[in-house]
Amino acid sequence: MSKKEIKNTGTEATRSDRAEATRSLEEIFEQRIARDEKIEPKNWMPEKYRKTHIRQISQHAHSEIVGMLPEGNWITRAPSLRRKVALLAKVQDEAGHGLYLYSACETLGITREELYEQLHTGKAKYSSIFNYPTTTWADMGAIGWLVDGAAIINQVPLCSTSYGPYARAMIRVCKEESFHQRQGFEIMTKLAQGTPEQKAMAQDALNRWWWPSLMMLGPTDAESVHTEQSMKWKLKRKTNDELRQQFIDQTVPQADLIGLTIPDPDLKWNDERGHYDFGAINWDEFWQVVKGHGPCNKERLSARVNAWEEGEWVRDAAMAYAEKQEDKKLKKAI
Amino acid sequence: MKNENIIQYIYGIADNALILGQRLSELCGHGPNLETDIALTNISLDLFGQIRSYFQYAAKLSGDKKTEDDLAFLRIEREYKNVLLVEQPNRHFGYVLTRQFFYDVFHLLLLQELQKSTDETLTAIAKKGIKEVSYHQRFSSDWIKRLGDGTEESHHKVQEAVDDLWKFTDELFHMTEDDRVAVESGIGVDVSKLKERYYKRVGEVLEEATLTIPETKWFQKGGKQGIHSEHMGYLLADLQYMQRTYPNMEW
């Protein structure tokens, strides 16, 4: 059979057409991204784009719901009614963020159950910072101020990311996060201006949360495996190191304002760079926590797994009840 | 009516919301799915909102620079006047929802009457609360039906909770001395008169949920007199931890 004849057979023609079609779809896709237009669930997208987005959005959703646990730890012990209500509402907001991020992720053709399965088996990651314990009330201030502060820096650029459902979810998330950050700073301010015991509590919390917050912005650019591709898809607009610098520059004057000391002897304003210089980050600790050996990795994951497993009979009941109601409706109608 | 009587009367209502709200807040982040987690936290938030209105009012009546937090956090166990029902632990979701349902039905009837109080503040708090509590009752009634008429396992579990918690329902209708004084002066509700409507409503939902109404005639009481179950001390240890450890500070 000659080459020409092969081309004329049905399967070959289809394959070649398909390759051609994919090429042109890919071009349309690239052009859309270049024009800053959103990619919507119904649009064609390369498989790698879909997978990367499932990974990042689900990691973000998991971080929200695992992130409920360290703060949830202080709801029953909040020091005043006003603080209790604010903390409850904040943790509830995080559940809400989880909910719409999971929904955004589901538009990429994966179910919430599958996503939970990935979290519960350790296949999917969540932000490592939530593997640190919350040992005092001041940690509620430090988490709001520093952790939510770092999260906002990470997340604001995502409001204009290329995947439509994610970008839209992030607009709402960012609005609420910025409220949480102010709330956390207000808790810290009150403590810093309080009794010596309260001030010591605030300083201790800052000492414990400062470095993990810097790590939260991700490995250094040299170590970051996803940065280049993510920048291309506008899933990332600034590198980890740029974001970290922005966070430090923004947070140091806030600590000064309330009279707390950043626990870094090498921290110094650099006139030439127009930024703060800062000390070396302990990346060994970071990787240790990422790999599951942080102070609370086991507790966090088992709390999630328990809630899910112990809730199974409840979800089953709701499903069975809904089916029975549907049957009743049908019987009535016929 | 003396201010002290009104304050005691307010404790009789608000402590139920406080202790139930605290129990629900323990669950935040641990619900069977995100939607229920959010809904239960919402109920807890509503209750704490109501508590703040009651205690701000009571603190004002006390006239001695007390704050809402002093009233909520700094009493000894004997001074909390909530019914035994609301302090019962979150043994499983069936217990959580049954406890909620048993309280919600009462709570709504109470607020519907309280809005007729001659005390304007209590009337206003009741009117605002009715909207919230109507939703709570709908939510918990729906779940009782889902669990009762869901799977065999859920039916068994929620029936177990109904059987165990039933003995705490009668206390809701006991009149304390403070209740009597409040009713006589026109500010309070005669809770004993709510009993018939309560059991009718509860019975209807349980029946629709294919659940059996317990036949027991033995009921537990004591909460309204400040004599609580062994669970209460631990709940208060959590609730009061910060205020007890760091007294006289602002947060």
Image: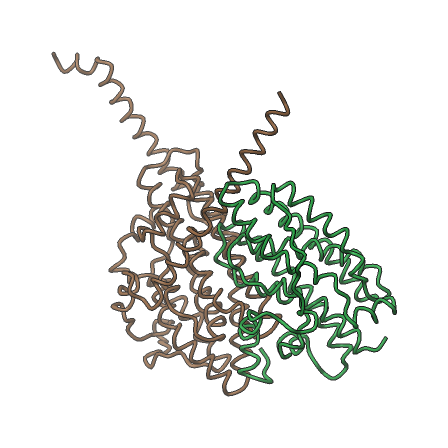
Chain colours: A brown, B green
Q: Give the image quarter of residue A278.
A: bottom left
Residue A106 rendering spot, x and y as whole percentages:
43, 41
Residue nearest the viewer, comparing A32 with B6? B6
Q: Position of residue B181 (x, y in %)?
A: 84, 71
In the image, what residue occupies the spot 81% across and 62% down? B190
Q: Residue drawn 48% across and 57% down? A: B30
Q: Is residue A173 visible?
A: no
Q: Quadrant of the N terminus of chain A?
A: top left
Counting from the top left corner in percent of width and height, residue A317 is at 51, 42
- Residue A32's quadrant in the figure? top left
Residue sticking out furthest to the bottom: A196
Quick check: A37 above or below A207? Answer: above
Above or below residue A42? Residue B37 is below
In the rendering, at what x and y percent does residue A190 appear? Answer: 55, 78
Q: Quadrant of residue B17?
A: bottom right
Circle count? 0
Residue sitting nearer the eye, B99 or A84: B99
Tell me if residue A90 can be seen: yes
Which one is in front, B133 or B15?
Answer: B15
Left or right of A288, for residue B148: right
Q: Quadrant of the C terminus of chain A?
A: top right
> Which residue lies most toward the left here?
A1
